[in-house]
Amino acid sequence: MEPTSKIKHVAIIMDGNGRWAQGRCRPRVWGHVRGSSVVSEIVEEADDLGLEALTLYAFSTENWSRPQLEVTTLFGLLKKFLLKERQRILKNKICFKVIGDISSLPLATKNLIEKLELETKDFKGLKLSFAFGYGGRSEIVDAVNQIISKGDVEHITEDDLRMNLYRTDVNDVDLLIRTGGDQRVSNFLLWQIAYAELFFTRTKWPEFTKEEFRGIIYQVAGRERRFGNIDSVESFEVSKVLAQENLMKINQPLQAH
Ligand code: IPE
Ligand code: IPE
Ligand code: MG
């Protein structure tokens, strides 16, 4: 079975740039520069593998608190990526979107994003999302506020919320990868990772390769995902009968014992 029949949406927390650079006695921003070239390679690999969606965490709402040089370097690298990858994105029919609050980005970068989103919005290839100025909590709060602004609401459903997230044309995350060795989700896609498989690698983002990426997907595709159910319907039926018998015993009047 093709791994992409089980793993359709991969999300990546691209972490470890700063430590990678510091470990080489270089400034942290050098790590971001090296890391940005890995992004192109991984996007290409995701496309070659036939993934439906790839969501990359590039800048979190919390990252605003970093030194200004680091923040502006990351802005610059986003712009460079957009300019460099534009032709490839168009050629490969990649449907591109930035998720997050980009209101503080320079106007020229915002225009590039808007143009590329518009040009690619009907493309049927890989759904590529860049999470920039992104926070999972903000996304949920924004969704709720959007629902409220649409009119009188007293009750909302999961579907209402889902339909008001930043990107509604992608399904939940199947696999969340974090590079850099830490094992946390750092406010990324909190709603969408409810049932994601998690994979943490020690490899720092600038050293992450398409071979490791492919290897992780193949490895995780072999895991059993149960979504709250159990491994086979047959044993499910058996345990249902056992549970009913147990319940009957529990419910027997006390004097019967
Ligand atoms: C990830 O690398 C990139 C961003 C958060 C923008 P870091 O900059 O967090 O690198 P480390 O984790 O400090 O090594
Ligand atoms: C998460 O990495 C954000 C991105 C990779 C863009 P951080 O380095 O900001 O996360 P923490 O601070 O280790 O949780
Ligand atoms: Mg980090």
Image (spheres, rainbow, N blue to C red):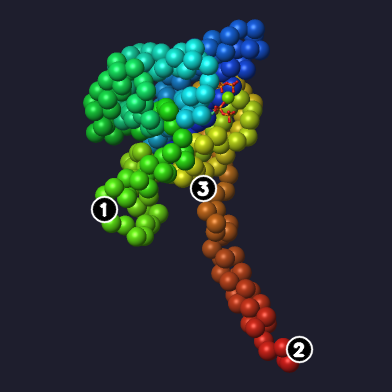
Residue 59's tag is none
Q: In which quarter of the image is residue 19?
A: top right
Disc 3 residue type (three-letter): Tyr
Residue 87 placement, left or right of 132: left
Q: Name the residue under label 2.
A: 257
Residue 152 makes an appearance in the image: yes
Residue 151 placement, left or right of 34: left
Residue 17 placement, left or right of 137: right
Q: How crowded is mark 3: few (under 14 residues within 10 Å), some or many (20 or more)?
A: some
Measured Cα–Cα span from mark 3 to mark 2? 43 Å
Disc 1 residue type (three-letter): Gly
Disc 2 residue type (three-letter): His
Q: Which residue is found at the position 48% from the left and 29% from the top?
A: 60
Q: Which residue is found at the position 47% from the left and 40% from the top?
A: 137
Q: Name the residue under label 3.
A: 195
Residue 151's tag is 1
